Image (spheres, helix red, strand yellow):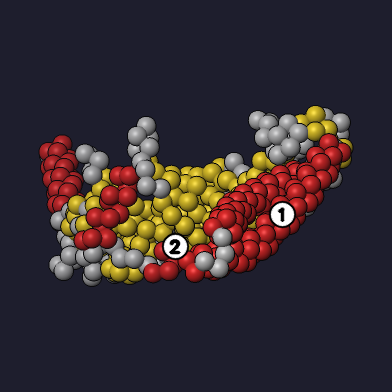
Amino acid sequence: MQRFENVSERGNLLVVSIGLACGLWLGGCNSSTSAPPPPVPEVATVTVRTEPVVLTTDLPGRTSAYAMAEIRPQVGGIIQKRLFEEGAEIEAGQVLYQIDPAPLQAAYDNTAANVATARKAADRARAALAASRAGVVRQQAVLENAQTNRKRFEDLVAEGAVSASQRDQAVTEANVAEATLLATEAQVESDREAVAAAEAAIKQAEAALETTRINLGYARVTAPIAGRIGRSSVTVGALVKASQDTPLATIQQLDPIYVDVTQSSANLLRLRQSLASGQLKGNGPKQAAVKLLLEDGTPYPVEGTLKFSDVTVDPSTGSFILRTVFPNPQHLLLPGMYVRAIVQEGLVDQAILVPQQAVSRDPKGNPVALVVDGSEKVAQRKIAVDRAIGDKWLISEGLKPGDRLIVEGIQKARPGTSVKAVPFSPGGKENPEAVKTGQAATKAQ
């Protein structure tokens, strides 16, 4: 009997154990089905707004001198002096070289003597002309007297008061006086031509004198412009020739200075289309202002001005030249330096700028953005990006004012899922969701 009682007790214990196990298992199942749902992901958003934006383009270019003069001699001779320091600032009209003036002075003296001789010859010709003109006056008086006597004698012959021989003598005297007058008048014409030739000889001699005077002045080689002069290609004692191929030195004006930048013709066409369609507007006088970056990336402290664009496109590169002018008082810019010019294209009145971290790419590489719609769900938008402006993208299509753009928490946001939108805090502050998950918030660039 004792044995059966022990077996019965053991059976009861087994039943109790199985019951407890089932109860615990059922209790676990009930606890899992009654657990609270996971929290809604929190994302940081910015509200899309429009704002006026000035569009610029970054163009490569090189500097060139505002004015450049190659100094060449205009007369030949021996260099006697060099009157400047290489690399110095030169004023316009400053004497740079002295060429031996002795041969030029001799030529000048010779032509001066020729001028004096020509003037004396002209004086003699004028005196002869005056004398011949006086002779014409006298011969006119003689002719008038002879013609009067001839008429009187012809009348007296008819009356028988004088003989025919006396009348014939009076006629001969009148004819001789007339012939003498004609000869004297011809002499006057000859003397007038002689005076004209003498005066022409004076002008020729004076022109030769002026030429030699100019050449004598060219013995002093002067600077045609102000600027900085380079090294001299000749020394004292060198023989130079007029208009030789090799310049004696070169002067370059560096303040102001040109910056020639290249612009593609395709960009020019796109810019004109944007202006014609109204998407882009001119920015008035400010549009001609140009900023400059030096070859090490340092901003140039002074703004320049856009002067003109070339009228010819280079067929090998498909680009043309834009010429800008920059003040250069410190001569920081030197000819031939590589620079980058920031040229204003125009003004966009209703531009949309979004943080760059809010834009991602789909598997095909197309730019997309996530927004929170009115039902607090995530929606994906295909967008078109125009260009980067600072730390933001300029959006041309896909977004509109008032859209709530997701900037942080993109990894937790899936299209169609519900999210909790909170304002984006720029400046590197942590957002609440990032603190909860132990991740640092993304800084606004």
Q: Is residue 85 visible?
A: no
Q: Specify few, some or many for label 2: CA neighbours under 10 Å numbering under 14, 14-19, or 20 or more.
A: some
Q: Is residue 165 visible?
A: yes
Local secondary structure at mark 2: helix
Which quarter of the figure is the C terminus placed in?
bottom left
Give me the disc on residue 76. none
As shown in the figure, which amino acid type bears the numbered disc 2?
Ala
Q: Which residue is mark 2?
A: 288
Residue at the spot 21% in from the left edge and 39% down from the top edge? 364
Q: Is residue 243 left or right of residue 17?
A: right
Q: Is residue 216 left or right of residue 434?
A: right
Residue 277 vs residue 399, the one in the foreground = 277
Give me the disc on residue 128. 1
As shown in the figure, which amino acid type bears the numbered disc 1?
Ala
Q: Is residue 370 left or right of residue 179?
A: left
Residue 127 vs residue 154, the one in the foreground = 154
